Image (cartoon, rainbow, N blue to C red):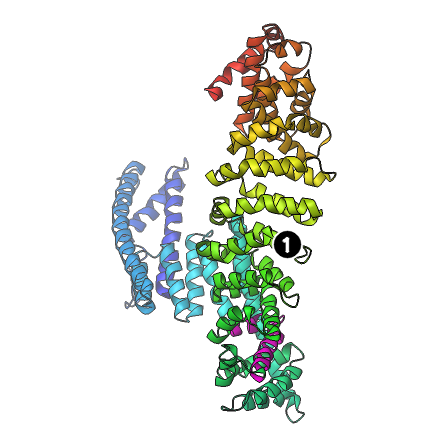
């Protein structure tokens, strides 16, 4: 491709030269114009198609005859030259369109071959396409990708460099070049390529972070292996370097009793004292030797139940944990073993305490860091794992429920974990969760905050949130759990439960509507709690659940919730204010009685006016305006607001540039009702030049 690339650069230079000639032909300097005509004539006479890949076999003539110009200032003009250039440009455009069609067809054939994993054929098609159109960026990046699959990393880098000459902002080129440099163990160059992607497209930080993590892991792996090999060489004859291979050789002997292997594993465990020893184990094929041992495999699959077999099973799990602790490459190697993948999930619920303990400890190692979590999520049966962890939490033994819930909480931080749980959520999560919520006690209270936190992470996934929001058993269990926590003053559990309910009730669901009344009754009882945090979250539940149930609204109004919300708004924090004004707005929208109660407790609606004047939260000011509009339907309220700043407050919001159009809309509605009910407010509106603002808001109201 060297000849092609040289021709391509020549083509780009020719374009620049033509631009210069056209500029000189238009010059007012006759001498410059004449010289440009002579050069243009020579250029056209010698012109050939650019960017053609050819092998030049001609001999250079060092004494060529002088070129005879086809025109001169006497027989031609700049206008004629321009016409020639225009015809030539049109001809070239037509030819380029034809070449583009051929190159695109070859690219498509290359893509088909690539999809079928025929990378050699794909490279051929992409190369043929470049013979037609050497400045087609996609052909270079596609060929680079195919070359990476073929292990031709230097060729891939060359393709990416040419793609960047076609388009210096081509992020695909940097991706493939970064991967190729990584395979060549040129880590700094690889990092530079990936970092360039963020410079071009800042929104791709997450993707780039994953690539950079791969570079770090690969560099760390190489360093570990170099250090381990050096230690092995230095340890020859001294015992340390040869211990690992000798022990693994003994463990590879078939047909021994479990006690034999158990002893060997114990000695091996003592030898794994640092990262170098962990790496030596991997380099000596230790994971395959142990998992490939028939006796070990039978123990891990729990085919035998005697004490020695269980001890061997626990010893294998313990060794794996020590080998994988802080060693990403070992974690990767272990998860490549099918025996491990099955055992790591199944043994969580083992009847044997030591086995269960070591299995949970191994999983905890994987759950601690993002790389380990992703390895486990990609390798394990996530639904079975979660189901077994929940069983461990539901039926605690030897205080291992703490480890189980910590593992679940760590894994729940990964989006992919939630996605894999979507299809079997009821059996693996909902059934055990509702059982635990119905039976909160002193024995399990310590794990519930972390468990509910893990469920809170899971419901960030829309599918899981909708499934929980539409599950009747959840909404039956929530009031039971609230009453239990309230009775025993388990505030540390009550906070996360109420937070989870707020999250779920943002979904409109007939199931929530059915259970809204009993849930709101519980929360109304919590409004008398001495703990401000409990009151805030209980109000939050009311604000999200009440809009779904008119029955619940009527019941809590009878319970004097309006006065409670008014008191709360006078001294509440930001979250409590947001929840309280929304609750008050829902109640006044649904009930004449609620409006009367609000006016009785605050005749000049000073609380609402304060929110309109001071709150920077558009949700708060929008609801305050809407609540005010509801109250203005009562007789005499508009008149009682004469002399206040209400017109100015509403006008500011109606004329403002709020991100939420509902704020302007609600303010305009309230302002319209105010002036219609009490015409004297129109005088103030006129003074403030507000009619035009009100008129412009009519489109929002319509």
Q: Give, as a single range, the part of the protein colored magenta.
A: 308-334
Name the spot of residue 385 as percent of width and height, x first: 51, 64
Q: Quick check: 322 above or below 504?
A: below
Tell me which corner region of the image, top left, top right, bottom left or bottom right, holds residue 650. Answer: top right
The C terminus sits in image quarter? top left
Residue at the location (40% across, 44% down)? Answer: 20
Rendered residue at 65%/22% (across/down): 608
Density class for disc 1 (Cα within 10 Å; few <14, some 14-19, many ≥20) is many
Q: In the rendered structure, does residue 330 fall within the stretch colored magenta?
A: yes
Residue placed under numbered mark 1 in the picture: 448
Q: Secondary structure at mark 1?
A: helix
596, 137: nearer the viewer = 596
Q: Is residue 16 above or below residue 664?
A: below
Q: Is any part of residue 188 visible from this angle? A: no
**Location of residue 17 in the rendering, given as x and y in whole percent from the top left corner:** 39, 48
- The reply, left or right, for residue 262 in relation to residue 417 is right
């Amino acid at each position: 491709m060297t000849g092609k690339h040289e021709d391509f650069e020549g083509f780009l230079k020719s374009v620049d030269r033509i631009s210069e000639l056209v500029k000189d032909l238009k010059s007012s300097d006759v001498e410059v114009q004449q010289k440009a005509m002579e050069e243009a004539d020579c250029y056209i006479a010698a012109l050939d198609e650019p960017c053609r890949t050819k092998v030049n076999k001609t001999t250079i003539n060092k004494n060529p005859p002088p070129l005879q110009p086809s025109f001169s200032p006497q027989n031609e003009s700049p206008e004629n030259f321009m016409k020639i250039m225009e015809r030539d440009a049109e001809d070239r455009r037509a030819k380029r369109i034809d070449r583009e069609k051929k190159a695109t067809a070859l690219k498509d054939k290359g893509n088909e071959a690539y999809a079928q994993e025929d990378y050699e054929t794909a490279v051929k098609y992409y190369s043929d396409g470049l013979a037609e159109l050497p400045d087609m960026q996609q052909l270079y990046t596609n060929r680079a990708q195919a070359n990476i699959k073929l292990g031709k990393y230097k060729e891939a880098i060359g393709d990416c460099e040419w793609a960047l000459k076609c388009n210096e902002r081509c992020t695909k080129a940097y991706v493939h070049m970064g991967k190729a440099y990584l395979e060549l163990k040129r880590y700094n160059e690889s990092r530079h390529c990936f970092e360039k992607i963020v410079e071009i497209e800042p929104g791709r930080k997450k993707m780039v972070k994953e690539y950079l993590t791969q570079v770090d892991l690969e560099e760390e792996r190489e360093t570990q292996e170099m250090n381990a090999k050096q230690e092995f060489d230095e340890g020859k004859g001294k015992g340390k370097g040869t211990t690992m291979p000798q022990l693994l050789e003994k463990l590879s002997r078939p047909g021994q009793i479990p006690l034999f292997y158990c002893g060997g594993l114990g000695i091996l465990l003592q030898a794994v004292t640092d990262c170098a020893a962990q790496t030596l184990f991997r380099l000596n094929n230790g994971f395959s030797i142990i998992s490939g041992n028939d006796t070990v495999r039978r123990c891990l699959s729990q085919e035998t139940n005697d004490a020695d077999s269980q001890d061997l099973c626990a010893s294998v799990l313990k060794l794996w944990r020590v080998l994988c602790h802080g060693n990403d490459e070992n974690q990767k190697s272990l998860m490549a073993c099918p025996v491990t993948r099955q055992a790591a999930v199944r043994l969580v619920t083992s009847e044997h305490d030591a086995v269960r303990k070591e299995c949970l400890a191994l999983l905890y190692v994987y759950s601690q860091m993002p790389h380990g979590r992703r390895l486990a999520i990609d390798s394990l049966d996530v639904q079975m794992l979660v189901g077994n962890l929940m069983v461990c939490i539901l039926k605690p033994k030897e205080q291992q429920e703490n480890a189980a819930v910590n593992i679940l909480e760590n894994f729940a931080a990964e989006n992919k974990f939630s996605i894999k749980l979507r299809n079997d959520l009821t059996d693996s999560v909902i059934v055990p969760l509702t059982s635990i919520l119905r039976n909160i006690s002193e024995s399990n209270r310590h794990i519930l905050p972390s468990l509910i936190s893990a469920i809170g992470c899971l419901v960030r996934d829309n599918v899981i949130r909708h499934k929980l929001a539409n599950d009747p058993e959840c909404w039956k269990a929530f009031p039971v759990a609230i009453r239990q926590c309230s009775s025993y003053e388990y505030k540390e559990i009550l906070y996360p439960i109420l937070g989870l309910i707020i999250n779920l009730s943002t979904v409109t669901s007939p199931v929530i509507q059915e259970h809204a009344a009993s849930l709101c009754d519980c929360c109304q009882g919590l409004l008398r709690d001495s703990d401000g945090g409990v009151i805030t979250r209980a109000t939050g539940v009311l604000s999200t659940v009440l809009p779904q149930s008119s029955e619940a609204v009527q019941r809590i109004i009878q319970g004097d919730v309006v006065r409670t919300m008014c008191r709360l708004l006078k001294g509440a924090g930001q979250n409590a204010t947001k929840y309280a004004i929304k609750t008050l707005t829902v109640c006044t929208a649904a009930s004449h009685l609620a409006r009367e109660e609000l006016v009785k407790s605050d005749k000049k609606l000073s609380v609402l006016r304060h929110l309109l004047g001071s709150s920077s939260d558009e949700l708060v000011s929008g609801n305050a305006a809407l609540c005010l509009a509801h109250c203005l339907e009562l007789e005499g309220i508009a008149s009682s607001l004469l002399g206040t700043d209400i017109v100015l407050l509403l006008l500011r919001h109606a004329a403002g540039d709020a991100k939420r159009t509902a704020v302007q809309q609600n303010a305009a509605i309230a302002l319209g009702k105010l002036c219609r009910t009490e015409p004297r407010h129109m005088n103030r509106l006129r003074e403030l030049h507000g009619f035009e603002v009100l008129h412009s808001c009519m489109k929002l109201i319509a």
